[in-house]
Amino acid sequence: MLVRRCLRGDATAIQALVERFQGDVFGLCVRLLRHRHDAEDVTQEVFLRVFRSLRRWDSRRPFRPWILGIAVNRCRTWLSQRSRRPELVEYLQDTAPGPEPDDSLELTREIHAAVAELRMEYRTVFVLFHEQGQAYEDIAQVLGKPVGTIKTWLHRARLEVLDQLKRRGMIAEVEHELP
Amino acid sequence: MNCLECQELLQRRLDGERVSASADLELHLASCQKCRLHQAGAGLLLDGLKALPRIEPPADFADQIVASILHDRVRRRLRMRRRVWLTAGLAAAILVMAWAGNLWLPNHRPENAPQHIVENKDTKETKTPAPDESPTPLGQAVDEARDAVLALTERVAGETKEQAKLFIAAAPTDVSGLTEKVRNMGDPPMQEPLDPAAQSLRQAGQGVSQGFQTVAGNARRAVDFFYNELPVLDGP
């Protein structure tokens, strides 16, 4: 098993494990921190912590929620530290993929902006569910909350995102015709 | 269908479930503008989420992370090794010091060192064991300790009593016979009444003396109590 090889200090196994999870961890960090450079630092820190505490991982539980839980906790700590420093807003510049905006890019950018406005718990649940494709049960494990709480948070997060999109004029009034 | 049920369906759709449009839903959407907006927004959100680009880390990010993990591992191992060596060295130093102290201390006691812990002619003499004597049993050692504490306390009490007598002797002598009577403090109580000044001095002297007697008594009881609590040791 990959984790066992990592514990023995096998550099190839460490590389494989990092490559397998770096995308998820980095994506989550970018979304939660809204700052690409900070996300790189935090991702590196997350993997350091993961390998330091690999022996404490319960092998009966899935690995992904465990590592994502560490990432969420690190992001929370980083955000609380950053709140004491001047805010660095690089999110839009960092995540804007291209210069010329078409409709879908405009929409994704608006969704990003709306998600960025959410409070931390809602944002985490939204990103884990819609971007990382995690199940409710796994998100509950990541955040250490009951599944019911996760469903409630996700429901509220979606309503807030829809409200934001409406306020930004992305949702137009459509006439509904009965079939 | 009401708004609550409509929103419930909307959430299930956003959860990824396939929700087929029912006639009830269509009827409600036709009549409720709020739910119609939500329905349109949900569709837009689903489209937008599908189009969300995956955030990719920098190209050599994994290599950087692995390098930092390996570096961290080496550093932690070195730190751990240093800590182990430090602990072992400290333990060895303590052992050597204990061993050296055990060897050195009894042999290097000065020969003319006082053998009596307490010198008081009125009390029992307490001797420290000679180095070549066989080890003292615990019971005997405690006995000696008790005697030493008692002797020390009684000695202090005696000295204080003497000082009090001297102090009273130095007091004004216009009271006839006071000095002589105070010197006999501790004897049966005086029958003759004294004047107020002499009485207060006498009371002060008695109070000091009694205070130390109480201390001596308490110390004796404490040592006795401790001695009684000791387990009985079998003789050699």
Image (cartoon, coloured by chain):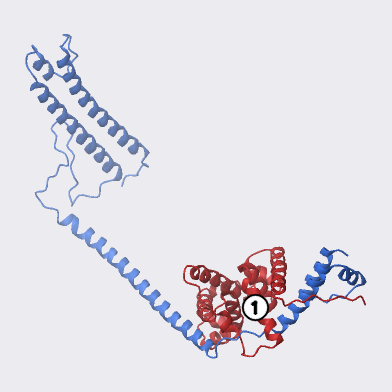
Chain colours: A red, B blue
Q: Nearer the viewer, residue B205 or A165?
A: A165
Which residue in the protein does label 1 denote? A112
Q: Quadrant of residue B233?
A: top left
Relative to A60, is B158 on the left or the right? left
Residue at 69 percent across and 88 percent down: it is A102
- Horizontal and vertical percent for residue B101? 22, 59
Local SS, label 1: helix
Q: Quadrant of residue B172?
A: top left
Q: Quadrant of residue B9?
A: bottom right
Relative to A63, is B122 on the left or the right? left
Residue at 16 percent across and 29 percent down: it is B160
Q: Residues within 10 Å of mark 1 (few under 14, many from 20)?
A: many
Quadrant that contains the C terminus of chain A: bottom right
Looking at the image, residue A89 lies above or below residue B135: below
- Horizontal and vertical percent for residue A97? 61, 88
Relative to B230, is B96 on the left or the right? left
